[in-house]
Every structure is written in C-alpha cells, then in structure tokens.
Image (cartoon, rainbow, N blue to C red):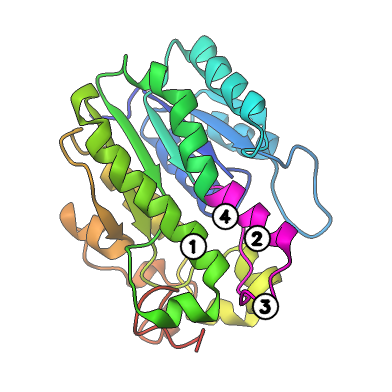
Amino acid sequence: MSNLKNRTILITGASRGIGRAIALAAAKRGANVVIAAKTAEPHPKLEGTIHTVADEVRALGAKALAVQVDVRDHSQVFTLMQQAADTFGGLDMLVNNAGAISLTTVEDTRPNVFDRMLSINARAVYLTAHAALPFLKKSSHAHILSLSPPLNMNTRWLAAHGPYTLSKYGMTMLSLGMAEEFKPHGIAVNCLWPRTIIATAAIEHALMGKDAFALCRKPEIMADAAIAILEQPVSYTGQALLDEQALAHVGITELRDYAYNTANADRLGADLFLDDCEWSK
C-alpha cells in the first residue's frame, strides 16, 4: 500500500502542468488532494483551473479540495492551511510548485517582475512552510517538496538571468535549511528539478513556443519523481534531486515513454541550471 493512502497533500500551482500531474499521481495512490492555485476561472489560452483538476482527482476515486490562493498573500496562505486541515483532519505533505519566470538580466528585469519572482518562488517556500508547520508537526509522514534546482554556482546561470536564478536558488537554500531545522519534528524537506525541459504552458507561451515540445518530456515524469520522494520515510531528507535521480532511487530507469515525442526521446533539451543545457545559451 502506498504511503500516500489517506494522507493529505497540498500542491501550489496545481491548476495545470506539473502541479496537475502531481495531483493526479497522488490521487491514484489514494491521497486527499488540495489543489491550490490562482486560476479559478477558465483562461482563454491556458487549459485548466483548480476546479477542473479537482474534478479529475475525484474521478480517480480520491477526495479533493480546490482553493483559490495567491501564495504572495500571507493571510490567504494561513487560511489555506487551516482549510486543508479542517477539511481532511490534518496535513501531511506540501508541494511548492507555484512559480514565476523571466529569463532576463538585471538590466532588463523590471522591479515589479523581480519582486514577483522573489515572492512567488523563494518567499512562498518560507511562507507555506511557516503556515503549514503546526499541522505537519502532527503528521507521522510529513514531507515538504520544492520544485527547485540543485545549486550550481557556474556564473553562467548568475549572469544570464540573475534575478530568476536568485529566486530559484533561494527556494533550494531555504529547503535545505528547513531539512535540518525540521529534523527534530520528523519532517522531511527535499527539492526536485527536471533533467530535461518539460512540456508546460511556460515553455509554450513564455519561453520557447510549442515547437519546443519536441525537445521535452511530459509533466508525468516530474509527477512520478515527486511521488517517489514523497513515499520515502521522513528520514529521507535534505536532497536536491533531478527527476531521473529520484526515479532511479526506486528502480525506474527506463524513461523513453516520458518523452513528449518518443521518436525524439534521445534528443531532448536539458533544463536550466544544468551545465549541458543547450537551449538557453
């Protein structure tokens, strides 16, 4: 039986993409799923809302709670955690998936964009953990997972888009620090990052266009990797893993079917912060 059975998992940014995929993967393992995101109404260009994902979770036989939330707003985040605990009798797992991205230099990044990335990426990891901590302390299988990269101090990543890099590395540094801080409470804290670029709305609309999906894997690889981490005992903590590493830890090494186009599975693009990344040069 999965360690997620009858556990409650809260996922930010869960209305589409990787967050949605994690929600569905958790539902298949019997978890109660809290779908937390800003999108409550249909978007003209982007598929999915908190309500459509909640319906998908319920269709899999699991319980769902859809909550509209802005992870920058501390009062909304505190209310979210209380609502999740009140609905399901507690909170066991928190996945920090919500994100903001602008691959711009310091010169080309507007102050409001800088503030948005820091608030949605780094600050939200602090805020959600801070608000969830009283509930996670009561769980016997408490996990926090942040979708952020291993720390790579190659100055290439600092020069090309320093503001975004700061926000994502901030997520990782906070998570690694919390892993040590929360050990006495039996709360595991880890990070997860894709080895390749993932076919998401950010790739299609903000970065490279849909043609780039030929270089991508599907969000399901990140979902399965997240589940592989979240099913580990709470002693498995303080890791900053790529999806391939998390899957290999549970014996999954055949990854071809995760490719968006399996015919192109051997020619995929590496993601940001990995030194063999070609597409961002």
The residue that mark 4 highlights is: 17
* Stretch of the chain drawn in magenta: 97-121
Q: Which residue is mark 2?
A: 114
In three-dimensional space, the C-alpha distance between marks 4 and 2, rounded to whole angstroms, equals 23 Å
Relative to residue 242, is residue 265 drawn left or right? Answer: right
Q: Secondary structure at mark 4?
A: helix
Q: For the residues marked 4 and 3, what is the alpha-carbon distance in whole angstroms?
A: 30 Å
In the rendered structure, which disc, 4 or 3, sits on the residue that comes first in sequence? 4
Residue under the image location 43 percent in, 84 percent down: 264
Answer with mark 4 or mark 2, whichever residue precedes in sequence. Answer: 4
Q: Earlier in the sequence, mark 2 or mark 3?
A: 3
Separation of residues labelled 1 and 4 (CA atoms) = 23 Å
Give the residue type at disc 2.
Phe
Foreground mark, 4 or 2, reads 2
Q: Quickly name the residue at label 1.
A: 166
Residue 67's spot in the image, x, y percent? 65, 28
Asked whether the beta carbons under mark 4 and mark 2 sit within 8 Å of each other, the answer is no
Secondary structure at numbered mark 1: helix
Residue at image position (84%, 56%) is 44
Which residue is label 3 attached to? Answer: 107
Name the amino acid, label 3: Glu
Please tell me which of labels 1 and 2 falls first in the chain: 2
Residue 1 location in percent, x, y? 23, 29
